[in-house]
Image: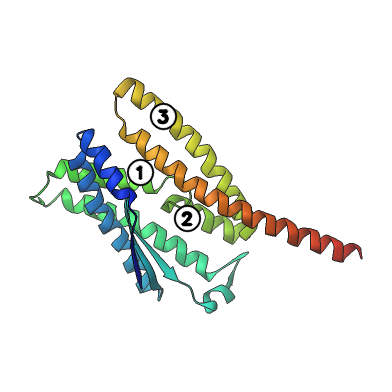
Amino acid sequence: MRFRIDLKIFLFLILFYFTKQIETYVVIIIFAILHELGHLLAGLCMGMKPDKIELKPYGVSISFSLTPKDYNKKIGKGNLLEIKKVIVALAGPLTNVILIAIARKISFGLFSNLMILYANFLLILFNLLPIYPLDGGRVLKGILHILLGKEKAERYTNHFSFVVLILMTFVASIGIYYIKNISIFLITIFLWGLYLQEDFVFRKKRKIYDLIQKTIEIDTNS
C-alpha cells in the first residue's frame, strides 16, 4: 500500500492562517480524516483492498484495488463494483452524521461542540456536492453507470459537475462581496482544479469512445 502527501496542504495552512481561520481548518481536517476512515471501513467490510492513501488539503483520500470478479457480475448496465463504490462513497458522510449525533450527547473537550457540529455539517454538505470526484459525484456516477452504462455516466457526471461549479462560483463571489469570507472562494478554486483534472481524463476517454463508435459503424456498413 502506497502513501503520498499532497504539498498543496501547506498552501492551505498558510491561507487559512492569514485569514484567521486556522482553527476551523484544523478541526475540519481532523474530522475529514475520520470521514475517510468511514470509507476505509466500508471498503474493508465489502472485501475491497486499500491500494493508496493520500493526505490532501481536504483530508485523506483512500483508493482501493479492484478485483476482476466484481467487474464480471452485471447489475443493469453496470456491474457489482458500482454498487460497492456507491456504498463506500456514502459511508464517509454517514460517518459525519454519526459524529454529529455523538457531539450532541458528549463533549469532546479539546474543541467546542459547536465547532465540531459546524465542521461535520460542512463536510457532509461539501462531500455530497454532485461534483466528481467528491462523494456526491461518485454516487451520481455509480448510479448513472448502473442505469445508463459507463460512457453516458461519465459524460453526464462531467456536465453536471461543470454546472454545479458554475453555481458555486457565483455563490462564492457573493460570499466575498457581502460576507467578506474568502474560504468558500478558496474551496471553489480547489474544486475547479479537481474538475479540470477529471475533465482532462474524460476528454481522453471520449476520444477512445468516439474511435470505437466509428470502428463499429465501419464494421456495420462493410
Question: Which is nearer the N-term, disc 1 or disc 3?
Answer: 1
> Which structural element holds mark 3?
helix
Q: CA distance from mark 1 to mark 3?
A: 14 Å
Q: Quadrant of residue 216?
A: bottom right
Q: How is the image coloured?
A: rainbow
Q: Quadrant of residue 25?
A: top left
Which residue, as the protein is rendered here, is positioned at the far left? 109
Q: CA distance from mark 3 to mark 2?
A: 23 Å
Question: Which is nearer the N-term, disc 3 or disc 2?
Answer: 2
> Which structural element holds mark 1?
helix
Q: Which residue is mark 3?
A: 171
Q: Is residue 173 above or below residue 136?
A: above
Query: Residue at 45% of width from left, 44% of height from top?
Result: 193
Q: Amino acid at mark 2?
A: Arg
Q: Which residue is mark 2?
A: 138
Question: Which is nearer the N-term, disc 1 or disc 2?
Answer: 1
**Percent coordinates x, y for residue 150 in the rendering:** 61, 60
Residue 187 visible somewhere in the drawing: yes
**Percent coordinates x, y for residue 146 in the rendering:** 58, 61
Tag 1 and tag 3, C-beta contact below 8 Å: no
Q: CA distance from mark 1 to mark 2?
A: 14 Å
Given residues 3 and 114, the one toward you in this image is 3
Query: Residue at 86% of width from left, 62% of height from top?
Result: 218
Q: Amino acid at mark 1?
A: Leu
**Percent coordinates x, y for residue 176 in the rendering:** 34, 25
Callout 1: few (<14), some (14-19), or many (20+) C-alpha neighbours within 10 Å? few
Is 21 left, or right, of 211 in this rendering? left
> Which structural element holds mark 2?
helix
